[in-house]
């Protein structure tokens, strides 16, 4: 197999080929304990401190199913409009992998707990229906750290370290049926779908869905077929893509790569691929195994799961408002235009804006700060807006200082600097940096007198009735007082002195 491929520009590739996608999203559940044992699931614990004979696969250790994980799986299935199995069971998925100490993964194969569902996503005002093949329960693997190489991968590494803390954490894998949408929409539909699942998981309260911590990961399957044909091409599977932007980039890159191979008369290899955040490219992993290669067989140490219809209906009653309906409701309550709402959702700021409004801020002010000042900072830092070290409550506190006349919008930006730098609350930053607006008439009057003396021509215009000219004097006072003057009071003083 050639190691180099000529990439075809994305738009050019779409003139000859149609992409077909399949997305597999792994969701780590936020249960207190692992899927089959009582070990803790705390993220970031010291390596190999959250393990026991069961999750280490030691001889004689027997697993027990986590009931809360089953409950979460059912609620996820219901939220995705799936059928819930009357009876299902676990299977052993056999393969050699150093970060799976049992040398097999306990998963579900032909009998998943949830199957045959659907959901919808909206892109540029158009709704796309995504068919769900299955949502099944399984356990996560451990984590390998490859040391000594330049890439952090096993190739070129001198040795590897294994952390089994993550091995056995409950996972739900959500698998779509083939997604066939207009080619130019494929990257944005893939991104919107993963974003939608994250919103859904958060609304259900079953996962923290932190892509940066791996609790929500997407595998992007993609193939191309010539325009006008119906037979699917050979697929590649880009593994463990961990941001919305990267999902979109992975689709675009693989379309360009597949097209280059096909244009050259080559054949696409069915394989896993690694995604590279640095440049949006992918590289070969291993040739992809088919289901029969894993030698699935029923797990003999676990009883089947048979949720009663009464329990399923009880769980159905706990489902939250669907994200799409919630967005429509909030848009109406907030008075946002379609464009306002699209921008808010697109920035990943919907929940942040909602929480800021709940904390007492007006919708307009919440949108202004999150989609303006804070979106700019997240773009500059190359992080998702939700990763900024500031909470909706802190944003609401800053706006309350503005509403009280204690700071203005310009000073608020300095308060944001301080809060984001970890200098304390908004009140503490204002006090420490001396940012409060000056409303003392003595200080303001002296500054106004100086501005009038420095700008006699402007003062004369105001005396002549051109009140709008006061803006120039207000600006002079604000400059003199480093933006900390009470602009409304300054205007009153100017007009009093020159009337």
Image (cartoon, rainbow, N blue to C red):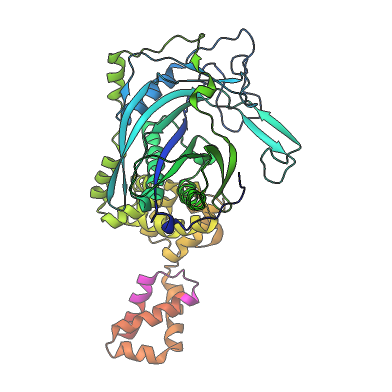
Residue 131 lies left or right of residue 268; in this view the side is left
Q: Is residue 486 magenta?
A: yes
> Residue 151: where, in percent of width, then height?
67, 45
Question: Looking at the picture, does residue 347 appear above or below residue 222?
Answer: below
* Residue ranking furthest to the front: 265
Q: Residue 184 or 364: which is nearer the viewer?
A: 184
Specify start and end residues of the magenta stretch as a single range: 479-492
In the rendered image, the vertical position of residue 234 relative to residue 253, given as above or below: above
Quarter of the image containing the C terminus? Answer: bottom left
Rendered residue at 43%/88% (across/down): 455
| Residue 430 shows up from this direction | no
Quadrant containing the N terminus in the rendered view: top right
Q: Position of residue 478 (x, y in %)?
A: 45, 74
Q: Residue furthest left?
A: 332
Percent coordinates x, y for residue 417 in the rendering: 53, 58
Outermost residue on the top side: it is 60
Relative placement, left or right, of 308 versus 214 is left
Q: Nearer the viewer, residue 268 or 181?
A: 268
- Percent coordinates x, y for residue 58 in the rendering: 64, 13
Identify the residue shown where x is 57% and y is 35%: 287
Q: How many marks?
A: 0
């Amino acid at each position: 197999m050639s190691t180099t491929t000529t990439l075809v520009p994305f738009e050019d590739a779409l003139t000859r080929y149609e992409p077909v996608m399949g997305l597999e999203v792994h969701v780590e559940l936020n249960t207190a304990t692992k899927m089959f044992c009582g070990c803790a699931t705390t993220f970031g614990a010291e390596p190999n401190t959250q393990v026991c004979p069961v999750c280490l696969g030691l001889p004689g250790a027997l697993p027990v199913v986590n009931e809360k994980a089953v409950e979460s799986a059912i609620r996820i299935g219901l939220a995705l409009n799936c059928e819930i199995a009357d009876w299902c069971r676990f299977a052993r998925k056999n393969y050699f992998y150093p970060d799976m100490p049992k040398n097999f993964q306990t998963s579900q194969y032909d009998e998943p707990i949830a199957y045959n569902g659907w959901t919808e996503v909206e892109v540029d005002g158009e709704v796309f229906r995504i068919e769900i093949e299955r949502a099944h329960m399984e356990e996560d693997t451990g984590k390998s750290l490859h040391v000594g190489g330049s890439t952090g991968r096993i190739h070129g590494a001198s040795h590897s370290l294994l952390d089994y803390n993550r091995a056995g954490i409950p996972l739900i894998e959500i698998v779509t049926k083939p997604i066939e949408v207009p080619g130019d929409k494929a990257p944005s539909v893939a991104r919107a779908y993963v974003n939608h699942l994250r919103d859904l998981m958060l609304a259900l309260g079953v996962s923290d869905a932190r892509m940066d911590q791996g609790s929500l990961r997407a595998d992007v399957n993609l193939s191309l077929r010539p325009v006008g044909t119906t037979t699917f091409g050979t697929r590649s599977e880009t593994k463990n893509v961990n941001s919305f932007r990267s999902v979109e980039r992975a689709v675009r890159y693989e379309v360009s790569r597949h097209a280059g191979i096909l244009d050259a008369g080559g054949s696409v290899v069915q394989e896993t691929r690694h995604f590279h955040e640095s440049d949006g490219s992918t590289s070969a992993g291993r040739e992809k195994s088919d289901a029969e290669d894993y030698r699935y067989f029923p797990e003999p140490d676990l009883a089947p799961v048979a949720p009663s219809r009464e329990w399923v209906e009880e769980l159905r009653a706990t489902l939250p408002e669907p994200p799409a309906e919630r967005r429509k409701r909030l848009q109406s309550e907030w008075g946002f235009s379609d464009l306002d709402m699209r921008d808010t959702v697109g920035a990943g700021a919907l929940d942040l804006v909602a929480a800021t409004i709940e904390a007492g801020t007006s919708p307009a002010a919440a949108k202004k700060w999150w989609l303006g000042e804070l979106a700019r900072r997240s773009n500059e830092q190359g992080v998702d807006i939700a990763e900024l070290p500031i909470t909706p409550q802190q944003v609401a506190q800053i706006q309350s200082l503005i509403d009280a006349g204690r700071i203005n919008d310009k000073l608020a930006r300095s308060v944001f600097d301080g809060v984001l730098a970890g200098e304390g609350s908004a009140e503490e930053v204002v006090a420490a940096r001396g940012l409060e607006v000056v409303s003392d008439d003595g200080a303001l009057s002296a500054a106004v007198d100086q501005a009038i003396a420095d700008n006699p021509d402007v003062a004369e215009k105001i005396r002549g009735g051109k009140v709008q000219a006061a803006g120039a004097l207000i600006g002079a006072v604000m400059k003199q007082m480093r933006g900390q003057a009470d602009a409304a009071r300054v205007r009153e003083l100017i007009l009093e002195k020159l009337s």
